[in-house]
């Protein structure tokens, strides 16, 4: 996957890089130990501010703190450019990873940074003058982080693994496009590489060890889907399988046996288990073009069949709540003249609705109608991969966060209660925001 907002940066980096030297990571201090686990609470929102720096804030807009203070975006007129992107929380809610790009006088360095909010320390765990990192995804133990890098002169992407303790990063695999999910125990990675078999005979689904050793390539033909999924209990894998006339959403055990069809679909599909493993949400489309825009369904994972809940036609992304009781979804506003999300991205504007589906009752509630920021729009087409690494939900499943463009040209971070009891609250100036997992 390639985030559209990074395409200009990838091109610029390729033109400006003059050597293939990797910069060794400097010695790093020891991170503070994790705090004892606590019941789900509000957590913390990390967001990219309109000044280019990264911040944290609580759900009421109070207790704001800066993670970075030295951003120099291209619009600033400064000779040197420093850009921060990709804020991504670790599973334990303690560490915030992000990318930093320094461009000055014909040279460029890309870095992967980790901020420890307990110790208020920032560590550099990867840097390169050649590879450009993007899309970050922590391991379940919060000690390692996988990420993609682009490499000049090749269409392939590297899947890299970096370590919080400062050990040298590793290349685990290569391919394009590249999607993956960690096993719940953090020992293995289930990958989908190369797209659909119909357009790429080399497309594959496989399991890697977390050390990069190829463990198993399955003899199945992947269909049109992006991110695979791993059941919360670690026992089953889920992916899209190519059929003669229609695609099939299937699950199997980690050995590749006991294959079971869960649903069929016409064109493309996205899917994920609920955090407790009791349900499966799918978003299927009727067309191969235009990105994900289709029907949201929720199935029982124990006895899939007729959907327990269904939202037709206009849904473009969804996120499970941590308590597995609700699904937040984004839909194109029915009054919007834009016909596809791809057109919305090209024009940089489109009106979305944020809604919450109550899985048990099968009812939906409209929470907000807004024009998303460009940074948030880049997440939407890849929401099924982001679903593994980032969340818009508060840990207690009571609130959601989103970023919106405003009439005066500003960009705001907004928080809304999932029950619709309170009006949306603007908590900061920002273009992209995610909630901590804890």
Image (cartoon, rainbow, N blue to C red):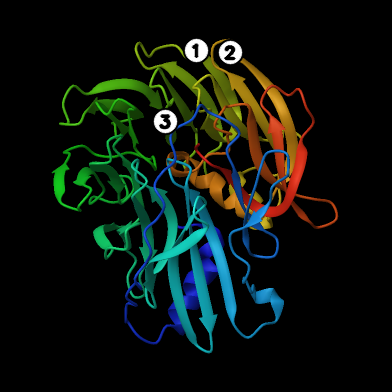
Residue closer to the observer: 203 or 430: 430
The number of numbered discs placed on residues in the rendered structure image is 3
- The CA distance from mark 3 to mark 2 is 18 Å
The percent position of residue 417, horizontal first and vertical second, equals 69, 28
Mark before the other along the chain sequence, 3 or 2: 3
Q: Residue drawn 66% across and 26% down?
A: 418
Give the mark nearer the N terminus: 3 vs 1.
3
Q: In the rendered image, which residue does mark 1 sit on?
A: 308
Within 10 Å of disc 1 (Cα), the crowding (few <14, some 14-19, many 20+) is: some
Q: Can you see residue 94?
A: yes
Q: CA distance from mark 3 to mark 1?
A: 15 Å
- Of residue 141 and residue 80, the one placed in the foreground of this image is 141
Q: What crowding class fits label 3: few (fewer than 14 Cα within 10 Å), some (14-19), or many (20 or more)?
A: many
Give the secondary structure at mark 2. loop
| Above or below, comparing residue 298 to residue 160 in the picture | above
**Residue 319's x, y, as percent?**
53, 33
Q: Are marks 3 and 2 in contact (CB under 8 Å)?
A: no
Q: Is residue 337 visible?
A: no
| Residue lying at 85% horizontally and 55% vertically, measured from the top left | 408
> What residue does disc 2 label?
362
- Separation of residues labelled 2 and 1 (CA atoms): 7 Å
Screen quadrant of the N terminus: bottom left
Q: Counting residues from the N terminus, which is met first, the one under dot 2 or under dot 1?
A: 1
| In this view, 211 is above or below 391 | below
Say what secondary structure mark 1 lies in: loop
Seen from this angle, which residue lies furthest bottom?
A: 105
Q: Determine contact: label 2, label 1, CB under 8 Å.
A: yes
- What residue is shown with label 3? 272
Number of the label disc, if any, that sits on residue 367: none
């Amino acid at each position: 996957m390639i985030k559209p907002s990074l395409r200009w940066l990838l091109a610029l980096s390729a033109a400006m890089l003059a050597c293939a030297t990797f910069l060794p990571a400097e010695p790093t201090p020891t991170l503070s130990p994790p705090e004892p686990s606590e019941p789900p609470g509000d957590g913390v929102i990390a967001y990219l501010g309109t000044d280019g720096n990264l911040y944290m804030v609580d759900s009421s807009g109070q207790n704001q703190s800066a993670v970075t203070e030295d951003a120099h975006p291209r619009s600033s007129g400064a000779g040197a450019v420093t850009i921060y992107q990709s804020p991504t929380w670790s599973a334990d809610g303690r560490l915030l990873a992000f990318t930093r790009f320094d461009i000055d006088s014909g040279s460029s360095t890309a870095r992967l940074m980790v901020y420890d909010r307990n110790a208020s320390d920032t560590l550099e765990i990867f840097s390169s003058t050649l590879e450009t990192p993007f899309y970050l995804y922590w391991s379940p133990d919060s000690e390692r982080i996988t990420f993609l890098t682009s490499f000049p002169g090749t269409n392939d992407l590297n899947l890299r693994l970096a370590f919080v303790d400062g050990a040298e990063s590793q290349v685990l695999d290569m391919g394009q496009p590249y999607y993956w999910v960690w096993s719940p125990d953090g020992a293995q990675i289930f990958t989908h590489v190369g797209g659909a078999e119909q357009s790429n005979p080399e497309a594959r689904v496989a399991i890697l060890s977390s050390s990069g050793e190829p463990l198993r390539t399955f003899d199945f033909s992947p269909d049109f889907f992006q991110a695979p999924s791993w059941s919360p209990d670690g026992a089953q894998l889920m992916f899209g399988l190519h059929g003669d006339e229609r695609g099939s959403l299937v699950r199997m055990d980690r050995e590749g046996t006991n294959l079971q069809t869960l649903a069929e679909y016409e064109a493309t599909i996205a899917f994920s288990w609920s955090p407790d493993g009791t349900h499966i949400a799918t978003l299927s489309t009727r067309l191969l073009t235009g990105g994900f825009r289709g029907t949201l369904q929720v199935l029982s994972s124990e006895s899939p069949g007729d959907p327990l809940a269904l939202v037709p036609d206009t849904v473009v992304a969804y996120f499970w709540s941590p308590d597995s009781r609700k699904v937040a979804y984004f839909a194109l506003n029915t009054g919007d003249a834009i016909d596809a999300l791809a057109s919305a991205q090209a024009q940089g504007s489109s009106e979305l609705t944020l809604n919450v589906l109550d899985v048990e009752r099968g009812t939906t509630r409209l929470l907000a109608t807004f024009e998303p920021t460009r940074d948030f729009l880049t997440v939407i087409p890849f929401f099924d991969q982001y679903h593994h690494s980032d969340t818009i939900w508060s840990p207690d499943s009571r609130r959601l966060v989103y970023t919106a463009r405003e009439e005066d040209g500003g960009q705001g971070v907004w928080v809304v209660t999932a029950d619709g009891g309170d009006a949306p609250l603007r908590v900061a100036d920002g273009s992209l925001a995610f909630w901590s997992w804890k």
